[in-house]
Image (cartoon, rainbow, N blue to C red):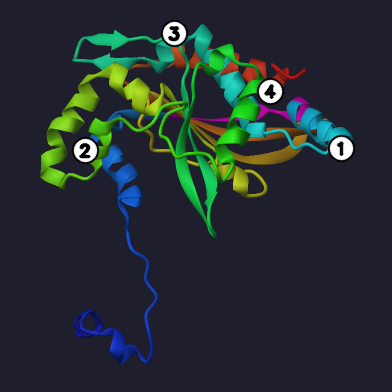
Amino acid sequence: MTTGKQDSEVKPEDSGGNIPFREITRRSTGPIDLLNNIAPKNRIYGLVEIDVTKARKFISENEAKTGEKLSFTAWVIKCIAQAISEHREIQAFKKGKMKLIVFDDVDVGMIIERQVKSERFPTQYIVRKANEKSFRQIHDEIRRAQKPNTSESIVTGEGIPNSVSIFLRLPGPLKKPFWWKIRSDPFLRKRLMGTVGVTALGMFGKGGGWAIPIGLHSVVFALGGISRKPRDLANPVDIVEYLCTTVMFDEEVSFGAPATRFLAKLSELMQTGFGLE
């Protein structure tokens, strides 16, 4: 019973040496504030396996021929953008209680790692109008954004608005009017974070497995691991690569049938290697 109290009273000089620590910066707490204030409250998840054998083979063969490693995530973004352009209601934002704003542009928000001096930092980046860009254009755009000398920005081609810079420096209680503004203005949300969220955290591991996202958008994709198994148990030689994909929908925006049709279209595009030339 006394252990917790004793531990809480331990001082750095009592530990026999310096205790390493790292400061929590505004950059670290910003995403937590966003999730607490504007993330969808009613979420529904779909965990699916999508055949990506053709795309993986194309990227591997291209690297063997040219030495260039194409971005698998960029290709997935292209397929997502195409599928959403045919089912735009999936990415709608609520305005008030009775209206949905359905955007034509598919702006994909993602987190990229950038080298800053000796450390790597996650930075938000938005691929604007991904539905109008080719796989190669999206690949090149992501690679440019990952370069160390790229200026920091929360939106493609735009700097952080002055109002947002001021907002990030305010203490918690004074931020409430700004959170209300962001929640109630779909056009501001689109500008600040895009219309769709994609995270590829699961891609850093090996083997299958799903990542469970908690996102800010009406639809968020988490790209998990890639599993290898037979397409048909009767033919164990025919090995297929499946991408473990988790899709989070805002239940107040997307209901069962539209979400099901959208996932069917996305699976079809990815299985056939859409956009690969």
Rounded to the nearest angstrom, the CA distance separating label 2 from label 4 is: 36 Å
Q: Secondary structure at mark 4?
A: helix
Name the residue: 48% across, 9% down.
Answer: 87
Instruction: Work out whether residue 35 or residue 261 is closer to the camera in this orientation and state it.
Output: 35
The label number, if any, that marks residue 136 in the structure image = 4
Residue underneath mark 2? 167
Q: Residues within 10 Å of mark 3 (few under 14, many from 20)?
A: some
Q: Amino acid at mark 1?
A: Ala
Q: Which residues are magenta?
A: 45-54
N-terminal of the pair, mark 3 or mark 1, is: 1
Rounded to the nearest angstrom, the CA distance separating label 1 from label 2 is: 48 Å
Q: Residues within 10 Å of mark 4 (few under 14, many from 20)?
A: some
The label number, if any, that marks residue 104 in the structure image = 3
Q: Residues within 10 Å of mark 1 (few under 14, many from 20)?
A: few
N-terminal of the pair, mark 2 or mark 3, is: 3
Q: Secondary structure at mark 2?
A: helix
Q: Position of residue 17 (x, y in %)?
A: 38, 88
Instruction: Work out whether residue 108 or residue 242 is closer to the camera in this orientation and state it.
Output: 108
Residue underneath mark 1? 64
Q: Closer to the observer: label 2 or label 3?
A: 2
Q: Secondary structure at mark 1?
A: helix
Q: Is residue 37 above or below residue 114?
A: above
Answer yes or no: do the residues labelled 3 and 4 have beta carbons within 8 Å?
Answer: no
